[in-house]
Image (cartoon, rainbow, N blue to C red):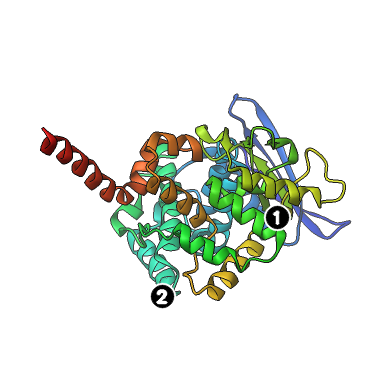
Amino acid sequence: MIKMPTYKDEKTGTWYCKFYYTDYTGKRRQKLKRGFVRQRDAKDWERQFLEKLQGTPDMTFQSLYDLYLEDISHRLRENSVYGKKNIFKNRILPYFKDKPINEITAVDIRNWQNAHIQAGYSDAYLDRIQNTLTTIMNYAVKYYNLPQNPCDKAGHMGKRTRSMKFWTLEQYQNVLQYINDTMAHTAIQILFYSGIRFGELLALHPADLDFNANTISITKSMQRKGGKDIYTPPKTENGIRTVSMPTAIMEELKAYIGKIYGIQPHQRIFPFTKTFISNTIRRCSAAANEPYIRIHDLRHSHVSLLIELGFSPHLIADRIGDTVQMVNNTYGHLYPNKQSEVSDRLNSILVSK
């Protein structure tokens, strides 16, 4: 590779860099980048470009991040990439972007951890940002010959919470009587009695509903990111499914849609934000003197209700668009009393003989 010097554009007063490089096919190409305020910025851009091209362990963390982001953008859903970008931008790049990745030590990682622990973030959030950093450094080990991941020696911060909040049917019905907004009432009814994810609710169109069969077809998910609606496939491979609904809930949904003037078959039914539903739950749970739960906990509430009604993990997994393993791992602790019921019934058989 032949580096060319930086130049000043006398007409604009800005700097540009022009240099040659060899691409992955072996062809020699020229690169030109204009519009830098300082000569230093032009040189830094050239250096980072060549670092990424060479992919060596002495590249800066910023260069590694650019390579990593380009890679995962072809492999992960857009909303997942968006979430990772936010963590890098706010929690990781400010600490490491200019440092060569082979000079990042376990002590550097510990200092970074301590700064975030002292900031008072939740264990779950600390766990998430730690996993994000660990993952990109593992990426550097695997693909760019970084000798070892300093996160391994530094240890982990935060922990994934295993606690689960949910409402019983009685608690839910108590809260529901305080929800007066028709749109919020209908949406929360669907979430509680279907177990669908919030993104799947936001993506619902009239065309997804069958009022004769009382079913909802889940084919997509939606999140609002960067001021635009992002539609993606459901979260898991089992996510595309048809959910049977109670007649009363579908009648409420039909009445709600009937009040939306001019709604089209492929138009969103619930054009609200997550904050709107969260605030509704917070306000109405307080009025009912019931514990506040998150929107996603309505999904947990649905599964706990199904377990209480005696449905199997296999049926529950099909209904909520996940795997039996996930149901057992996440909700297995809700089954102990069911095991007691099994032993009691077996005992009754033995006693009757």
Residue 39 rendering spot, x and y as whole percentages: 70, 59
Q: Which residue is mark 2?
A: 118
Three-letter residue code for mark 2? Gln
| Residue 123 x/y as whole percent | 39, 64
Q: Residue at x 49, y 60 (%)?
A: 96
Spatial separation of the CA atoms under disc 2 and disc 1: 29 Å
Report which quarter residue 40 is drawn in: bottom right
Which of the two discs, 2 and 1, labels the residue nearer the N terminus?
2
Q: Nearer the viewer, residue 158 or 237?
A: 237
Seen in the image, is 301 located left or right of residue 187? left
Residue 273 shows in this picture: no
Quickly name the residue at label 1.
Answer: 226
Residue 300, position as x, y percentages in the image: 45, 52
Q: Residues within 10 Å of mark 1 (few under 14, many from 20)?
A: few
Whether residue 272 sits left or right of residue 241 in the image: it is right
Quick check: can you spot residue 191? Answer: yes
Q: Could you tell me which secondary element the residue under label 1 belongs to?
A: loop
Within the image, what quadrant is residue 312 found in? top left
| Residue 30: % across, % down | 71, 35
Secondary structure of the residue carrying numbered label 2: helix
Name the residue nearer the viewer: 175 or 273.
175
Q: Name the outermost residue toward the front.
A: 352
